[in-house]
Image (cartoon, grey):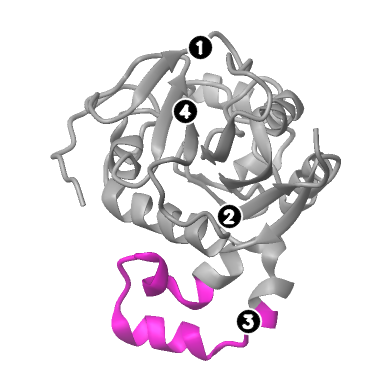
Amino acid sequence: MKTKPPTLNPGFIVQSGRQAKALKILKIIEDAGKVRNSSLKLLDIGTGNGEIAFFLSDYFDVTSVDVKDQRNQREGFAFVCIDGEYLPFENQHFDVVISNHVIEHVNNADFHLNEIYRVLKSDGAVYLATPNRLWPWEVHYQMPLLHYLPQPVFMQILKYMGKYHEEVSLLSWFSLKDKAQTHFSISIISDSVCKWPQRYYLNLNNKIALILSWIPLFLYRACTFIHPTLIVVFRPKSNQ
């Protein structure tokens, strides 16, 4: 697997654990039936520093997009700088689409999902991850509970506190399902990640991982609404 030391970039780009995150995404993609194959076209939306796209380019034909070019890794994949949420690709172009902690940053989540559906092949798969609005700790601004307020109020308080950086519109499990179900069938994956974290390359103490593995999967699934991160696989419901 390719490696590269991270460098700092502005914004909410996460620098740590990029290789582990890429391996987690790769496993989930493969579990969804998209076995690593250089002929499969993969779209990485919101590529950030480019490292996940770089890692995945070992296994897929990767194209990445973002509204700003903040890459510190530029090799191995195509990059397109886009304006807004429109994806400048033809219909049914990609076998796999990745939206990794992007949907909470876009201006229109419904349009984001519509565009993913449009460019995805009829037998394609989508990996989507986003922080859960109902989890009590807000990961972007690193504070508890305030994000339970209506989003405009939360943003206004952040501005008052001098902490505001950019708009974040968090989704709950219920709102994500509601938005996605028009176009996609939905498989929750975060329950399996919670139960078997090391299988998905999370760096966790072995004893804690063992305890988590003892908890029945149906209990994790029943608690999906409170998972820290919602990780799902979408499949298009019908031919486009």
Q: How far apart are the alpha carbons under marks 4 and 3?
A: 31 Å
Q: How far apart are the alpha carbons under marks 2 and 1?
A: 25 Å
* Residue 210 is covered by the magenta coloring: yes
Type of amino acid at the residue the image marks with label 2: Ile
4 or 2: tag closer to the N-terminus: 4
Looking at the rendering, which quadrant does residue 79 occupy?
A: top left
2 or 3: tag closer to the N-terminus: 3
Badge number at residue 46: 4
Neighbour tally class for label 3: few under 14, some 14-19, many 20 plus, Cα within 10 Å: some
Q: Is residue 98 found left or right of 5 in the rendered image? A: right
Q: How far apart are the alpha carbons under marks 4 and 2?
A: 16 Å
2 or 1: tag closer to the N-terminus: 1
Viewer-proximal residue among 87 and 13: 87
Q: Residue at x 63, y 15 (%)?
A: 86
Q: Residue at x 31, y 22 (%)?
A: 10
Q: Which residue is mark 3?
A: 217
Type of amino acid at the residue the image marks with label 1: Ile
Q: Which residues are magenta?
A: 194-219
Neighbour tally class for label 1: few under 14, some 14-19, many 20 plus, Cα within 10 Å: some
Q: Which residue is mark 1?
A: 82
Q: Secondary structure at mark 4?
A: loop
Main SS class of the magenta portion in the image = helix
Q: Residue at x 30, y 78 (%)?
A: 205
Image spot of residue 3 (x, y percent): 16, 45
Q: How far apart are the alpha carbons under marks 2 and 3?
A: 15 Å
Image spot of residue 21 (x, y percent): 37, 52
Q: Is residue 154 found left or right of 54 in the rendered image? A: right
